[in-house]
């Protein structure tokens, strides 16, 4: 009996040859895997906006984002923190200038701060959230003014409060002290302006002479000021704390 071949045999053979060629090509090809061990890689036009990858920068592996040629870049840096050895720290540092901003994420803490000129350290607003404490305020080494919160439930303020005479009508707290000389028995402490809402004054009173049975009272309070009277005519020092509510 003669052999019978499928009518489409040439087509089948052609398809099989094509599949074999594709399989061979695939077995001999792999995606490019380039490794740059030390040199920096620039993505984009160096004479315009570009990105620079620096595997071994001054502070660790770095990515620089340059808005234009010659401009100070924003730096993304990954290094190993000293507080938690072996744990990576991620920094975002703003472009250079007289002051720079930094954002840090490390194991157990997040920190945002302002740096002064090179070598001068912290020089502005700062916020810190950590597993052992939290705080925010202004730190420059000379005029520090900030709040600190600890796990034991204690909060502290470091710095000074502005005198009430220079605050606006929307201030929440008015602090200050006034000396009344002479031999009067009353005075009115005026707020710097008519306050935006009702005030709650708290008065501390120090007489010029330690007189027995001396008393003092708040006789009037409004959004404009507070009036105080005392029982023995003399000079006094009055310490004011008034809160807006």
Image (cartoon, rainbow, N blue to C red):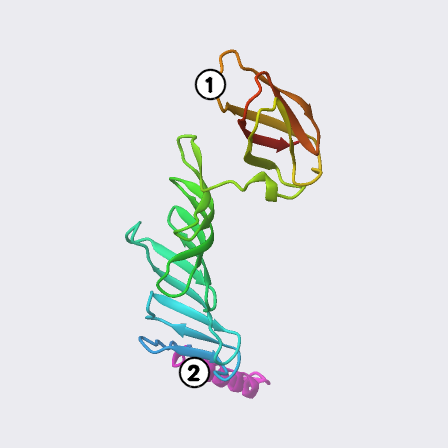
Furthest-front residue in this view: 182
Q: Quadrant of residue 4?
A: bottom right
| Residue linked to disc 1 | 210
Residue at image position (30%, 50%) is 83
Q: Indicate yes or no whether the magenta region holds residue 173.
A: no
In the rendered image, residue 217, in percent from the top left (x then y), is placed at 61, 19
In the rendered image, residue 73, in percent from the top left (x then y), is placed at 47, 72
User: What secondary structure is found at the residue carrying circle 1?
Assistant: loop
Which of 65 and 43 lies nearest the eye of the viewer?
65
Residue at image position (37%, 56%) is 89
Task: Read off the magenta span.
Answer: 1-30
In the rendered image, residue 213, in percent from the top left (x then y), is placed at 52, 11
Residue 1 visible in the shown view: no
| Residue linked to disc 2 | 25
Which of 23 and 130 lies nearest the eye of the viewer?
130
Residue at image position (46%, 63%) is 100
Which of 140 and 110 lies nearest the eye of the viewer?
140
């Amino acid at each position: 009996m003669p052999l019978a071949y499928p009518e489409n045999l040439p087509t089948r053979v052609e398809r099989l040859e094509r599949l074999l060629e594709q399989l061979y090509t695939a077995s001999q090809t792999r995606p490019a895997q380039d490794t740059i061990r030390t040199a920096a890689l620039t993505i984009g036009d160096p004479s315009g906006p570009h990105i620079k990858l620096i595997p071994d920068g001054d502070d660790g592996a770095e990515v620089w984002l340059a808005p234009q040629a010659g401009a100070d870049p924003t730096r993304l840096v990954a290094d190993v923190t000293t507080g938690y050895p072996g744990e990576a720290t991620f920094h975002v540092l703003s472009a250079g200038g007289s002051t720079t901003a930094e954002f840090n994420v490390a194991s157990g803490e997040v920190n945002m701060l302002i740096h002064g000129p090179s070598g001068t350290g912290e020089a502005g607003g700062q916020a810190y959230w950590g597993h052992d404490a939290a705080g925010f305020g202004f730190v420059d080494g000379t005029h520090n003014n900030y709040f600190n919160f600890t796990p034991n439930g204690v909060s502290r303020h470091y710095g000074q409060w502005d005198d009430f005479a220079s605050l606006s009508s929307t201030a929440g707290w008015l602090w200050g002290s006034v000396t009344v000389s002479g031999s009067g028995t009353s005075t009115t402490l005026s707020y710097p302006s008519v306050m935006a809402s009702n005030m709650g004054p708290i008065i501390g009173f120090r007489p010029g002479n330690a007189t027995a049975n001396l008393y003092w009272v708040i006789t009037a309070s409004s959004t404009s000021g507070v009036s105080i009277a005392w029982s023995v005519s003399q000079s006094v020092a009055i310490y004011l704390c008034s809160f807006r509510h």
